[in-house]
Image (spheres, rainbow, N blue to C red):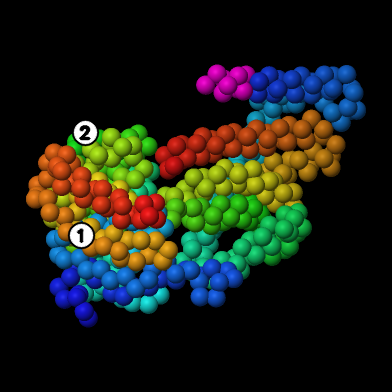
Amino acid sequence: MAGSGGAAIALHDVTRRFPLKGVPDGVLALDRVTLDVRPGEFVALLGPSGCGKSTLLRMTAGLDAPSTGTVRVGGNEPAAVAGRQGFGVAFQDHALLPWLTVRDNIALPFRVAGKPVNAARIAALIALVKLTGFEGAFPRNLSGGMRQRVNIARALVLEPEVLLLDEPFGALDAVTRRHMNLELQRIWTETRTTTLLVTHAVEEALFLADRIVVMTGRPGRVAQDLAVPFARPRPVEVMREEEFHRMQDSLVLALEPEAHD
Amino acid sequence: MRLARDLRILGLLGTLLLCLAWEAIGATGLGGFTWPPLSRVIAMLADPDRWDLFGRAAGSTLASAVEGYVFGALAGIALAMLTHFLPRLAPGADRLAAGMHAIPTVALAPVFLILLPAGSTAPTLAGIGVAFLVYVAAASGLRASSAAHRDLFQVLGSRPSARLLRLDLPAGLPSIATGLRLAVPAALIGAVIGEWFGAPRGLGVLIVNGMQNFQIVLLWSAVLLVALISLTAYLIAGAIERAVHARFR
């Protein structure tokens, strides 16, 4: 298969139609999207609402299937990867179980997999996301930012092959969101897990990713594939560099071409 | 908090008014001679010579109700789990449960009386009422988990049994607890009606005897006792339900 040799995530010629009453062929949500993510690479899928970027991520996770085309993760079907606990996921809805404490929420992937709970690993992750002291707290007693820290820790706990993030900080206020991006960058630099991040925030994509894939909507297509040149680890000052601003401006333009015609 | 306290005071006030009205109607003879004042009913319940009679009757009714409640609840939850794993059974199970519920308990009682071994009519009728309510609550409870949680378990590669144990069951507990609260009066109704039709002892037997022998105060005493037992159990189940809701939501 073209271009998928050794790729951690390989989406090839993926088309997705959603059935719609009265429309014979349904609505075309994704039109022949091809995307490879290399092992250890952090790729951001950037696009406006409704461009199908979340559908692409859900397909990668095996939660949706393409109408035509193939999705492979490490050369396997997504369902097989899920079966061997190869995914770590964090979505905008933190999806923490309200009846479990922080510690038990992070331990959930162990228990679901029927593996012995590695208490040392959980303690280390709680420290990594800076929630030491909150191990016994329930999600309802945490702030939005803290819940997403737990969400990220849970996604990382089984040392997944692939990390899938769908607007994990989308529901947070701007200040907390920027702070969480700094934290995610720090955490990611320590693990270097292959990551696919879906976002519509240009700054977030530029700050976090090695590569940005820009999508356009209706139907969803890949419009640009852009390498991010900033060296890692990236200090927060990166966001004040001239090159950062230049790329930010051009990406904003790419996202809404019709507004600048 | 103030509202809750005010409501409690209003509730006590309402209960007190009801008792006073009962007493007044009985004392003035406004309700006829079959309406005794509350004080005479309480006096009979408080009479130590009667405690043995009431104690044995209440114990028997309570035993039937508890037996029916436990088995009915287990059957309801088991059936709900079965339809959860085999969704094709769900429409049939729903109709069976609704059908059983649509038949009046009093109509079923004589059938069970001739069908079942002696003494098992009361717990069986209690169990049927409970099983229906708990099945409906458990079946909807097991479907109550959010789409985001179900997605998470799928991506984590969860087996169906792990999902039931770690997601569907805990997510369904609030609904199951509500069903268990609503099933408390159903268990007592079933037990008392079962006793009407044939039991060696029980509050239902006392009610029938009081009615047939025109022992009006005895009849009222037995009815009041059933009401008090039912209310107490209902309040305990309500407290458990609130605790479950606070923990699992």
Magenta segment's dominant SS is: helix
The answer to if B218 sits in the magenta stretch is: no
Q: Mark 1 lies on which chain?
A: A
What residue does disc 1 label?
A226
Q: Does residue A169 lie above or below A23 as drawn?
A: above
Left or right: A186, with A222 as reference point: left
Which of labels 2 and 1 is toward the front? 1
Q: Which residue is drawn at 60% across and 22% down?
A: B8
Q: Quadrant of the C terminus of chain B?
A: top left
Q: As drawn, is A88 to the left or to the right of B167?
A: left
Q: Taking the image as drawn, is residue B243 in sight?
A: yes
Q: How far apart are marks 2 and 1 (CA)?
A: 41 Å
* Secondary structure beneath label 2: loop
Q: Do labels 2 and 1 share a chain?
A: yes
Residue B214 figure quarter: top right
- Residue B64, horizontal then vertical, whole percent: 61, 48
Q: Residue B115: x percent and y percent?
A: 69, 65
Precedes in sequence: disc 2 or disc 1? 2
The magenta segment: B1-9
Query: Residue B125's quadrant in the figure?
Result: bottom right
Amino acid type at mark 1: Leu
- Residue situated in front as seen by the camera: A245 or B22: A245
Report which residue position mark 2 lands on.
A133
Amino acid at pointer 2? Gly
Where in the figure is residue B149, as x and y percent of width and height? 39, 54
Q: Return the mark for residue A237.
A: none
Q: Are marks 2 and 1 in contact (CB under 8 Å)?
A: no
Closer-to-camera residue (B166/A65): A65
The residue tagged with tag 1: helix, strand or loop?
Answer: strand
Q: Residue at x 28, y 35 (%)?
A: A175
Q: Mark 2 Cα within 10 Å, few/some/many (few <14, many 20+)?
A: few
